[in-house]
Amino acid sequence: MRRLALALAVVASALAGLPASGASALTLTGSTVKNERLSDVRFATPSLHGAGRAFVLLPDGYADDPARRYPVLYLLHGGLGTYVDWPRQGAIEALTADQDVIVVMPDGGPAGWYTDWWNRGRGGPPKWETFHVDELVAWVDATYRTIPERRARGIAGLSMGGFGAMSYAARNPEVFGWAASFSGAVDITRNPATQTTITAEAGFVNGRPFGPFGDPVAQRFVWRAHDPLTLAAKLRDTRVILAVGNGRPGPLDDRFSVGDVVEDQMYASGRRMHQRLESLGIPHAWDAYGRGTHSWPYWQRDLRTWLSDFLAGAQPG
């Protein structure tokens, strides 16, 4: 009970805290404490049509040592998903039970594609990159006891979120020092299947198939400006992880699994990114683990495998 009371006090303090100057457009409107570690926070921001949402997961014992600061991992969900996915399907609380890290899991829209939307040249809302990188990061650093340095700020995601992690890291190298893609769409300019998926999802969910990046031909410059493969050189000083399976049923699939074409496409995309980074002489981890489908057991394993790498690099020295 004492820990829960302390956690409630932490959230109350966050509600009373003023945003950092970089987060001046972001207003905290509410917070629901799920347990002593996990809170569901809500924001008002002109960057989005509706409320901005995120889960914040604190390390065990966060309230016990008011002087201690922690690295922060921003963890992104996939396409047609939501910010509740990592807590509900990703077992994030269990995966981080003994880890000294703050995890922030923001909503990115079911087909938001982690960008400030092109919207026929008019721009957003929705402005997902502005909400996540400019506003939310500043708010988190102002509200919680973070280590507000790029070495201690990582970003990772699955599928669409893998794209978001690499795109954000490449476009904002001063913000994130570590980036990981789990089965991510890290090549959106040379992969017609991924372009079709992006436009189809945006059309199905929002009625605007060319909303995120515009037409793949007419607005190719917009696609390239967000494409991790095109922006690979900007990751030179970032610790990069690329983890992906080949789409064939693997050790974490049930015996009825027949594999999937999505993971096969993500493998091809990841391999192109790996080859591009190699050609640029940029160190990175290429975790092509062979058999494995586009599914949660593998993404949980990816995070379990690579979280220690982020935390090791987040330490000073």
Image (cartoon, rainbow, N blue to C red):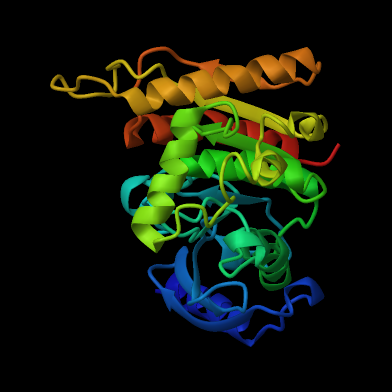
Q: Nearer the viewer, residue 137 or 99?
A: 137
Where is residue 55 shown, x and y percent of the image? 48, 63
Q: Quadrant of the N terminus?
A: bottom left
| Number of numbered discs visible in the structure rendering | 0
Instruction: Determine the residue positioned at 76% across, 34% down.
Output: 238
Instruction: Determine the residue positioned at 50% across, 58% down.
Output: 108
Where is residue 82 shown, x and y percent of the image? 40, 57
Q: Is residue 254 above or below residue 189?
A: above
Where is residue 90 shown, x and y percent of the image? 37, 45
Instruction: Determine the residue positioned at 42% across, 12% down.
Output: 290
Q: Using residue 187 as the reference point, say whether residue 79 is left or right of it.
A: left
Q: Residue furthest front?
A: 218
Q: Quadrant of the C terminus?
A: top right
Residue 33 visible: yes
Q: Nearer the viewer, residue 17 or 272?
A: 272
Q: Is residue 250 above or below residue 304?
A: above
Residue 227 position by quadrant: top right
Q: Residue furthest right?
A: 317
Q: Using residue 215 as the reference point, say whether residue 245 is left or right of it.
A: left
Q: Nearer the viewer, residue 53 or 124?
A: 124
Residue 79 visible: no
Q: Nearer the viewer, residue 198 or 75?
A: 198
Where is residue 140 shown, x and y percent of the image? 66, 66
Q: Residue furthest left?
A: 256
